Amino acid sequence: MLAAEADVLVRGAGPVGCAAAAALRDAGFKVEVMEAQAAPPGFRPIALSQGSRLILERLGAWQGLQATPIESIEVSQAGGFGRTRFDAADAGVPALGYVTDYGILTENFRFLVRELLTSESLPARCTVHAEGIADAQEKRYAQHALVALVHSEPPAQHTAFERFTGEGPLALLPFAGRHALVWTLPPERAQRLAACPEKEFLDALATAAGRRAGAPVKVEMRTVHPLVLRVRRTRIAPRAVYIGNAAQTLHPVAGQGLNLGLRDAWDLAQALRGATEPGEAAVLEAYAASRRLDAAAAIRVTDLLARGFMGSSRVARAARGAALTALDLLPAPRRFFARRMMFGPSALP
Ligand SMILES: Cc1cc2nc3c(=O)[nH]c(=O)nc-3n(C[C@H](O)[C@H](O)[C@H](O)COP(=O)(O)OP(=O)(O)OC[C@H]3O[C@@H](n4cnc5c(N)ncnc54)[C@H](O)[C@@H]3O)c2cc1C
């Protein structure tokens, strides 16, 4: 190894790149991190799973993080029967997940790895790509995500509301006494609602969201995000590995992208721990094989939810109603679903 050579160069100081850098440093590697942009973007809600909390705790990134616990999730559909509710007790955990802000989380992580950040492109024995963009064929959903911070009356507590509408799924997540809104809509309607007068926006939201989450009274920080699915054919290359959104970019409907990416980062550090050569093909191949099942399951579930829970036809509504009723009536599948969303397959009992 050359004197100035790092064991691992992480490209991208988003949450996944930072998590990988911290975990690899803790595993004893000399790590450098390169980031193209100084400041993370503005408000974007992130629902962290219980499994992600455990990873953040182990890395020292949980302490001091502003995150609101979700104690229950209510799933329903507009204009149809069927509703189900997941409680933390269903899964035997104190919270089903935690809502934070992407910018806050990223700043927290960057602080944790501040001594590893570099602006020079250094030689390294292994490169971890965490640039957040999967170099792969793109499947575009006919939807954009409209994101905003909504004040409701009464104020948000600890329940998340997921509602399937004919236009796409809508989530209201509790965050610091307000609701973080992620509303998937046809592109023109998303753009229109992002720019329209506040009253028009609040009326449209009240109609789509129903009454269970309270009445929306104020909205801030509206932004629009196009939604795509991009999955790299392979997550390794010679002396290189792709993690997080650089390996797979998912529709945010089930809040799985970052949770999956954090598991990528954690498992990478465990796979490399003890390896004398971090870029060795056999080590990277074993890592890639170990991530296949988790990634494939998250991609399938997310794609199914994004496609299957759209559509306003009678048949689509009946199918959604039946699925929700089944989940409501059958505790075992509900518990399975809740744990799968919180931990991924590897941590299932
Ligand atoms: C509206 C919306 C809501 C979402 N909600 C959730 C949710 O509730 N739960 C969840 O788990 N996921 C959610 N996601 C997905 C989640 O945001 C992503 O999965 C997550 O941000 C991926 O993290 P990452 O670090 O891999 O990539 P990114 O967050 O994209 O970070 C990549 C970093 O790499 C940097 N970079 C880019 N190019 C270069 C380069 N050439 N050199 C160096 N640095 C570079 C970028 O500046 C950036 O800092 C949501 C996504 C959207 C759009």
Image (tube, rainbow, N blue to C red):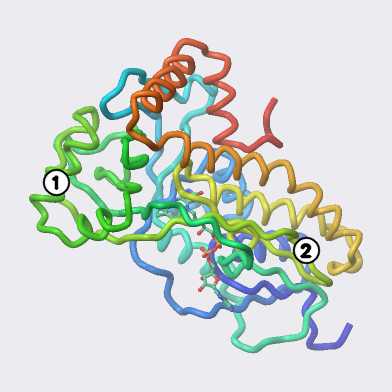
Is 4 or 220 nearer to us in this picture? 220
The residue that label 1 is drawn on is 202
Q: Which quadrant holds the N terminus? A: bottom right
Q: Is 198 located above or below residue 106 in the figure?
A: above
Q: Where residue 157 sits: x, y (%)?
A: 28, 35
Is 6 or 148 nearer to us in this picture? 148
Q: Is 65 located above or below residue 90 in the figure?
A: below
Residue 161 visible in the picture: no
Q: Residues within 10 Å of mark 1 (few under 14, many from 20)?
A: some
Q: Residue at x 19, y 38 (%)?
A: 155
Q: Is mark 1 within 8 Å of ligand 1?
A: no
Q: Residue at x 67, y 44 (%)?
A: 296
Q: Tell which circle, 2 or 1, labels the residue nearer the N-terminal end.
A: 1
Q: Which label number is shown at residue 181?
A: none
Instruction: State the SS at label 2.
Output: strand
Q: Where residue 79 sits: x, y (%)?
A: 26, 26
Q: Is 78 left or right of 319, judged from the image as shown?
A: left
Q: Where residue 59 sits: x, y (%)?
A: 62, 55
Q: Residues within 10 Å of mark 2 (few under 14, many from 20)?
A: many
Residue projecting furthest to the top: 329
Q: Is 201 located above or below residue 242 in the figure?
A: above
Q: Where residue 280 sits: x, y (%)?
A: 89, 67
Residue 239: quarter of image? bottom right
Residue 324 visible in the picture: yes
The residue that label 2 is drawn on is 236
Is 246 or 88 nearer to us in this picture? 246
Q: Amino acid at mark 2?
A: Ile
Q: Amino acid at mark 1?
A: Leu
Q: Is 263 left or right of 272, judged from the image as shown?
A: left
